[in-house]
Image (spheres, rainbow, N blue to C red):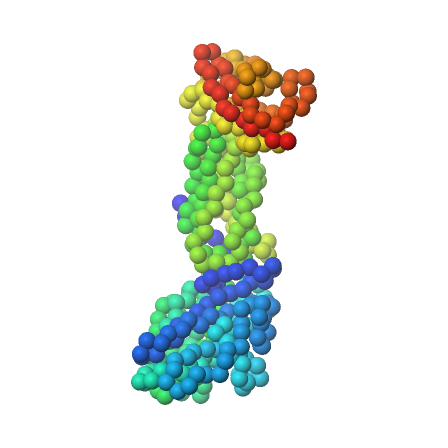
Amino acid sequence: MKKIFQIVLLVAVFASLANAQLVYDSVRVTDQVGGSKWLVFGIDPTATDGIDLALGEGLVPPFPPTGAFEARFFLPENNFSGTAASWRDFRFMDSVPYWGTKEFRLAYQPGTGSPGMRIEWNWPASITGVLQDLFGGVLINIPMSGTGFFNVTPALDRLKMVVTYDSSLSVELTSFGASVKGSTVQLSWQTSSEINNLGFDVERKSANTTWQKIAFVRGAGSTTSAQSYSYVDEDVTTGTYTYRLKQIDFDGTSTYSKEVEVDMAVSDFHLYQNYPNPFNPSTAVRFSVPTEGLVTVKVHDMLGQEITTLFYDNASAGVHTLSWNGKDSNGNDVSSGSYICRLTAGEFTQSVKMIFLK
């Protein structure tokens, strides 16, 4: 099941620095005799025109002797007229999400016997550029988008990339589904890429309720890597439930997913493992019954002695949730250790082991 979220595809790889948005892109420069180097560039609200050590930039040594391969970015100090160069080059971004144009200066030194260089790139759809000579595109004026390359044949050792970032593209929620797992509903979804994705409100409704937020799952921020998410809804009984996701950007804008539906039908008696386990101070005990009838749920110690009764009554068909807080029938705290929870319904019995830790 698919849903287009109006989130923005911006980068190839993303990392978070507090509230900063560090964007990684890359090009590869290769000479004709095997020398090769990946160069990383991008935008960040903390970047300057100089060396930003916190962003991984570092001043590289002078170009090697003649005959050795080298490639790097010259930094934009004094309109690229200085000597500062790095294999990583990040520029200041003044809006989130960012859209606009940045210029990067590419410098390289071919190895011996290499008359030309090969420039390769693999960018998302939101990034486009133009590869030009320093004369403004007189000799070289090559569009850069998607996956591509260009063989530089003129005797040039510097080029410029004019890179444009577009924030108007949308990304696809590639899947969203729900399935019944015992007495719970397992929700899972996947995105192909994200930008400024704060996260997802998980919303649910039933025949007797309107839409309600039941959880929030934090998003990945900005990334073009596929992300997988999940949530387990334990607060369900019998009946039909409908779920949807409300995707929320950092700026508060939101978009809803398509709805998915599950039917919680109980076909047999079952006592589920308590959760959490081990626990302190309390744990949830869930059981299901297919038809209405007398049900008993008790806690025993490991010697079989009864500690307390959690439930003794007629239970309607469906899933029921109890809670035990580590106290006996007199309200006294029990000691740390293992306990047995036992469900009895007619001739049916089932037990689970619980561990209480103080």
Question: Which x, y percent locates residue 267?
Answer: 41, 22
Q: Is residue 68 above or below residue 224?
A: below
Identify the residue at horizontal 49%, vertical 21% (top origin).
Answer: 351
Question: Which x, y percent locates residue 305?
Answer: 57, 15
* Nearer to me, 121 or 214: 121
* Nearer to me, 284 or 317: 284
Identify the residue at horizontal 44%, vertical 26% (top origin).
Answer: 265
Quarter containing the C terminus: top right
Q: Is residue 108 above or below residue 198?
A: below
Question: Which x, y percent locates residue 40?
Answer: 47, 70
Residue 33 can be seen in this image: yes
Q: Is residue 190 above or below residue 351?
A: below
Q: Is residue 312 above or below residue 151?
A: above
Identify the residue at horizontal 41%, vertical 79% (top origin).
Answer: 70
* Nearer to me, 335 or 283: 335
Question: Which x, y percent locates residue 283?
Answer: 58, 29
Q: Residue 290 falls in which quadrant of the image?
A: top left
Q: Residue furthest top?
A: 346
Identify the residue at horizontal 54%, vertical 20% (top origin).
Answer: 302
